[in-house]
Amino acid sequence: MLRPDTFYMRGNTLMNTMIRVEHLSKTFSQKDLTVEALKDVSFEIGQGDIYGIIGLSGAGKSTLVRCLNFLERPTGGTVTVAGKNLADLSTKELRAARQNIGMIFQHFNLLMQRTVLDNIMFPMEISGVPKDKAKKRAMELLETVGLTEKAKAYPVQLSGGQKQRVAIARVLANNPQVLLCDEATSALDPQTTRSILRLLRQINQEYGITIVVITHEMAVVQEICSRVAIIDHGVMVENGSVEEIFKAPKTEAAKRLIFGGIRQVPRMGSRHCVRIVFSEQSSYEPVIGNMVLEFKTPVNILYAATRNVSGKAKGEMVLQLSENEETAQKMIEYLKNRRLSVEELENYVNEEELEEDV
């Protein structure tokens, strides 16, 4: 079994390192075409973390996850899992290491001619586990994923969410230390997605498995992950706690993902727009109402939502402030003094139409 034997500092805390990626690059070459899918990517994942890797289509995130178990061999850099550099392992050693790095996919990849029970037993058969022990283990896993009554059913008789639960049970059969989820919920409806994410969190808590979630959906990361890396055109542009990045994204790529539901307003009378995120302390105070009374100036609420971020409800708003520069800046300071995260939004107003209105 793989054991984490390296460490890193997260803030003031010494963490066990399960996965360390250093200066990773991956280039695909075909005839006269060369594509740099990953460029100098470095990050660490602690033992027992649920770590998100998010990016838009074509960002390189699926290539990255396949490099974590060497299904894709990197062009440069290193991938270390539980203290072992995967590039240093022989073919036999790499095969053994992969038994401790499970992977689930968007399209389930179940064996259609086998029952649910037989699908879960399959990896144990390959590993040489006696049939009676494999069956007992498979039934235990069916109970874990809530599908005991489907043991004799075939995949064609299951819903998408049930198929993904079977795929998760099958991956758990060999007791992996790491679980890689490559767009595992992308083919599912929102309600089923939430149930699968709850199951993954339960597995993380009960078994201590380190989970890496690859997705293009910020809602998935906010729901389940403690930390997140953002990939854009093969480059890791931002990396940190989900809460920190949600409150104050620093890069354009992060802002595109987090502000995905916030669209540019075509006509407005002021350029002063801010996004605010409420802290636990500020959520009980009528901050906006008090600010309007304080400055005797109205504001427009252009967008408002509540999101689940790492198990906590986080409120966010986009406000249009006063056209007066001095008043707008005083309002921004007022909001910051109330312990709100405040970010001024550039290019939120359609400048051409604003000039026409002026």
Image (spheres, rainbow, N blue to C red):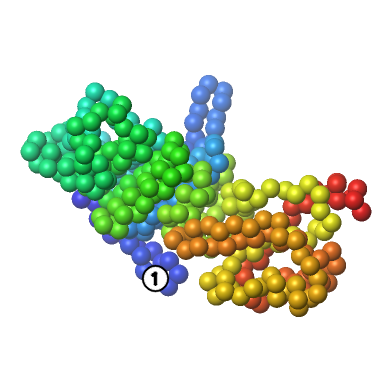
Residue 136 visible here: yes
Q: Is residue 241 left or right of residue 178?
A: right
Percent from the top left, x then y, of residue 321? 77, 64
Residue for point 71% across, 56% down:
302
Q: Residue at x 33, y 50 (%)?
A: 199
Please give left or right for residue 124 compared with residue 49 in the image: left
Residue in the image at 24% along x and 51% along y: 2
Is residue 33 rendered to the left or right of residue 118? Answer: right
Query: Which residue is at a point 50% across and 50% down the rendered structure image?
Result: 219
Q: Helix, strand or loop at disc 1?
A: strand
Q: Quadrant of the C terminus?
A: bottom right
Amino acid type, mark 1 = Thr
Q: Position of residue 66 (x, y in %)?
A: 39, 39
Q: Position of residue 265 (x, y in %)?
A: 75, 49
Q: Is residue 288 left or right of residue 108?
A: right
* Front-most of residues 105 and 161: 161
Residue 75 appears in the rendering: no
Quadrant location of residue 188?
A: top left
Quadrant for residue 8, please give it: bottom left
**How many marks do you count on the picture?**
1
Crowding near pointer 1: few (<14 within 10 Å), some, many (20+)?
few
Q: Residue 333 in the image: x percent, y percent? A: 72, 74
In the image, residue 63 sits, relative to residue 176, either above or below, namely above
260 versus 27 height, above or below: below
Q: Which residue is mark 1?
A: 13
Q: From this viewpoint, which residue is outermost toward the top? A: 31
Quarter of the image for residue 123 reads: top left
